Image (tube, rainbow, N blue to C red):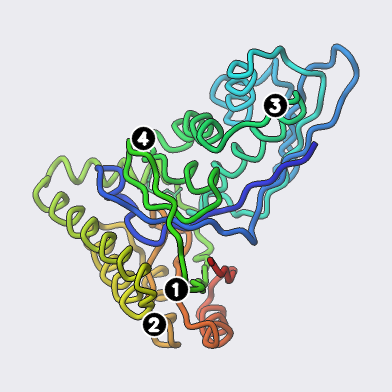
Amino acid sequence: MESSAPGKVILCGEHSVVYGEPAIAVPVTALRCRARMEPAMPGSGLLLVAADLNQRTPLRAAAPDYPLAALARLVLEHLNCGEPDAVLTIHSELPIAAGLGSGAAVSVAAARALAGFLGHVLSEEVVSALAYEVEKLHHGTPSGIDNTVIAWERPVFFIKGQTPEVLAINVPLCLLIADSGFPAATREVVAGVRQRRESDPDFYNTRFARIGALVRRARIALEQQDLSALGQMLDANHALLVEIGVSTPRLEALVQTARLAGALGAKLTGSGMGGNIIALVPMEEAPAVAGALRAAGAAHVWQTVTT
Ligand code: PMV
């Protein structure tokens, strides 16, 4: 029994989404996490194998806050099933702590594989809700956008606490994702923004509202297939993320490089303070912009086309 889940990028609206503003995220289908369930000796219980990290953890011995174990326990409880005698192996192509949704992808792939092994199919809503519980372990106060876009594997317009809207994207959206090579702990970056907002609520609330307005305009630009307008929204969103203090010189250099090389717009994606930037590029410009990003020191550059 095998299952997989994609990565994701937030097109616009990170951080403000935690405070009730909308955000748009798209799946990154080319970068995936895979989960495999295989039967094991009777009485052996469930062994959790994070193959890329060289970790082998029996469920029975796992700490309550070990994310993969927490996910397995949630799935078993949801299905009202006992622990199976099996091995659950995870392989992921997604970089960790890079804003590409690696934690949620592990949860979604693992939930589906475990449920499938037990003869059940979980709906997108259920998988997303179970993964959200585990996101709290990773992120503290997650908005829920990662687990949603990854469980649905469709572009989403997301507002915390509301039913997500699946967005039809009628024009191929070519994005380059460039890794700064520096990991970022979302939990700490989000906590830092929260702390700064507490000491200057007006400044932060104004920026969050501006980002929310940009996200709504980005949605219209997408509906109208106006990629140059969308690029401008991404640039403006990045400027506001700089103002709330989540960019770094490394991310700035990559964003500038992408723009100068022909991107329609570029911004950091995810929590910032490291991780990745995204650049919206005309399809024919993708090789040149990717080359410029590599030359500027990007640790990896991936291309994803959302249709
Ligand atoms: O993309 P990540 O996993 O780095 O999460 C960042 C998104 C935030 O808006 C900053 C936090 C959240 O929970 O939405």
- Say whether marks 1 and 2 touch (CB < 8 Å): yes
Viewer-side residue, 140 vs 176: 176
Q: CB atoms at circles 2 and 4 under 8 Å apart? A: no
Q: Which residue does the numbered mark 1 point to in the structure image?
A: 279
Give the amino acid at mark 1. Ala
Find the distance from the CA under tag 2 to the CA under tag 4. Answer: 33 Å
Q: What residue do we see at 28% from left, 65% from top? A: 237
Mark 3–mark 4 Cα distance, whole angstroms, equals 30 Å
Q: Is residue 193 left or right of residue 178?
A: left
Q: Nearer the viewer, mark 3 or mark 2?
A: 3
Residue 104 percent location from the top left of the image: 54, 42
Q: Quadrant of residue 49?
A: top right
Q: Which numbered circle lies on residue 259?
A: 2
* Badge 1: residue crowd in 10 Å (few <14, some 14–19, many ≥20): many
Q: Amino acid at mark 4?
A: Thr
Q: Which residue is mark 4?
A: 141
Give how far apart the Cα atoms at labels 1 and 2 are: 8 Å
Q: Is mark 4 within 8 Å of ligand 1?
A: yes
Q: Amino acid at mark 3?
A: His
Residue 190 vs residue 145, the one in the foreground: 145
Q: Secondary structure at mark 1?
A: strand
| Secondary structure under the numbered disc 3 in the rendered image | loop
Considering every residue shown, the one lying at the far left of the view is 202
Circle 4 SS class: loop
Q: Position of residue 57 (x, y in %)?
A: 72, 26
First reached walking from the N terminus: tag 2 or tag 4: 4
Q: Which residue is mark 3?
A: 120
Q: Residues within 10 Å of mark 2 (few under 14, many from 20)?
A: some
